[in-house]
Every structure is written in C-alpha cells, then in structure tokens.
Image: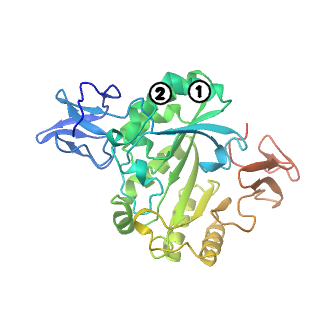
Amino acid sequence: MGIDLAEWKWKTKALYVEKTGKGLCCTLCPNLCLITEDYHGACHSRVLYNNWIYAINYGNPCSQSVDPIEKKPLYHFLPGSSAFSFATAGCNLKCRNCQNDQISQVSPFDVQHYDLSPEQIVAAALKSNCQSIAYTYTEPTTYFEFMLATARLARKQGLKNIFISNGYINKEPLQELMPFLDAANIDLKCHSNTTYQRLCEGRLQPVLNTIKALRNEYVWLEITNLLIPGITDDLEMITRLCDWLYQADMQTTPLHLSRFYPAHQLQHVGPTPLETMQQAYEIAIFAGIQHVYLGNVPQGNFSNTYCPQCKGILVERRGYAVRIHNFLDGRCGSCGEEVAGVWS
C-alpha cells in the first residue's frame, strides 16, 4: 500500500461494520465486502486499521464545484438554483461506461484532493450562495460518513441535501441518511439483473429497493436511465422499466433518458442513435410517465417542462439557462394544474 495509516489524517471509523467468522464485513452496501489487510473493498475506500474498518475518504474531496441544479440532473427541484457539489474517490460499482473513472475507480490514496471538513464545505456552499449541497460525481455511498456529517450540518444551516447516486446502498444506512435528504437522482441503469451484472457487477433489486424507499419517505426523486447501444437500449427493457415506475406510483417522477457517448471500457461503442432516443421517449410517454426528458440530445425541446394537463410550457431550458413561463407556486398559470416538484 505504501501509505502510513497512522499518518493519514482523512480517516474515520466506518459505520455499518459486522463481525463475522471470516473477519470484519462492511455492510454499507450490497457488496458486503470482507475487509482484510490486502483488500480495501470494491469501493477502494475501506481499510483494516486498529482491528476495525476505517473509511479513508473523510474530509478529502477530490472534486468540488458550484453547479447548476439542472446538471445533476434535477429538473423539478429548485430550477435555476446552484448546488455546491463534491465527491471523494471511489465507487461501489464497476460500470464499464463510467465517465468519471479517473476518480471513481481508484483509491483516495491515489488522487489529489482538497482538505475540507464538513464545516468548511457548508461554509463554502453558503459563501457561494448555493441553496443546496450535492453529493455527486462518484458514488456518495462510498463516502457515507463524510456525507452524513455534512448533511446534518447543512440542514442546520438551511441548506438542502441532494443525493446523486447509483442507489446501491443497504436499507439501514439509507434509513439513517434519508431524514437529511431533500432530493435524489438515482441512476437506474436498466430493468434487467443480467444486464446489471454484465455492465457494472451489481444487482438490480437493491436499486429498486432504494428508489421505493426514497419515494416512500417523500424525498424528491428523479430517475436517470442511460441508453447504451447493444446493452441498455433494448426497447422491451425500456418498456419494463417504465411500466415498473408507473406501477410503483411514480408516474409523476421525472425520467431522464440520457444519450450515451463512448467512455471508459466502451470506447468502441458509438453514441446512441437519435431514433432510439425518440423511440424510448415515446415508450415512456405511452407508459404514463408524465415528465420525460432526453439528455445529451442537441436538438428538439426535450429539456423543457410542460404542463401535464394543458401542455403549455412552464420551464424552458437552453443548456443550463432556465426561464420560467406562467408558472407560480407549482401550478400552471393557464389551467391551474399542480405539477409535482419542489419549486421554491
């Protein structure tokens, strides 16, 4: 390893550790990694130290930025506002299409980072006139202790907390986190367990469980589904995903269908055809999903929010620029229809 853990200041005792007959198990996510001197877990962020598991990503974000909320993407949550966004190195999935693999597929030991405590992050968010803090870029579940401490402080200071996640987290830690969450975007990669295993070495059901839990606890929720040619762009699979959302009473939950571009281990796969994006959009609308958006599509008006009743434009988006049309307190100014979201 080449790192003196006694000198590594950015560590804290890990939460959600279970003693087993084979050693100490991290129970934070469904991977249930046994942490040993030679294995730091699938996320690269847990080490064995002083006979316990320690998280080595506490207070050392590798990325930070002030982002428009639309970049997360969140379209029905405080449109036009800014989110102080940060991440530490590591992820608990191994997505072949990852666009941030330089920081997600490595250890916190291996990247340059900032020295920022939860208190400093909250102060920076307030100084930047942000309304929220977004735990994003990599997988925030892997820096759970850091995120939880920051979210608690942020709530006390009137800031919103946003969870941008793959949803691969166990029930108990999610239950501890949710009282401090205001919004989430979950990357639902597909509606096939086989494809989940092939694409990212994960499982589908834990992600569905997370989505339902967030919905049941009234955390504002939006879903992203990336359409990768030959992997997740199967129209029958997209239909199953949309039908599941509808049957789970999430027809008003915004669905972001995102166009794939070559990345990481899928450099040989071309961008998603625009025809496929259009077909997926029509499938989602036909399934009863009220708010469907197309991401990474350069033409058309697929980023605007329309009234589900009279179809009038309510929120116009050009890139990350936002303009509100005839829309006040979450109701359409033309027909009075209430539109699901957190608007102020």
Q: Name the image quarter holding residue 289.
A: bottom right
| Residue 280 on image: x %, y % | 60, 72
Residue ID at (67%, 38%): 82
Q: CA distance from mark 1 to mark 2?
A: 10 Å
The amino acid pointed to by label 1 is: Ala
The residue to which callout 1 is attached is: 124
Residue ID at (45%, 34%): 177
CB contact under 8 Å: marks 1 and 2: yes
- Let me know if residue 74 appears in the view: no
Say few, some or many: other residues with alpha carbon within 10 Å of mark 1 (under 14 / 14 to 19 / 20 or more).
some
Which quadrant does the N terminus fall into? top left
Q: Is residue 276 left or right of residue 103?
A: right
> Hey, which residue is sitting farthest left in the picture?
21
Q: Work out whether residue 61 or residue 340 is closer to the camera in this orientation and state it.
A: 61
The residue to which callout 2 is attached is: 116
Residue ID at (51%, 29%): 151
Q: Work out whether residue 171 or residue 302 is closer to the camera in this orientation and state it.
A: 302
Residue ID at (59%, 27%): 124
Q: Is residue 172 left or right of residue 251?
A: left
- Let me know if residue 121 appears in the view: yes
Which quadrant does the C terminus fall into? top right
SS of the residue at dot 1? helix
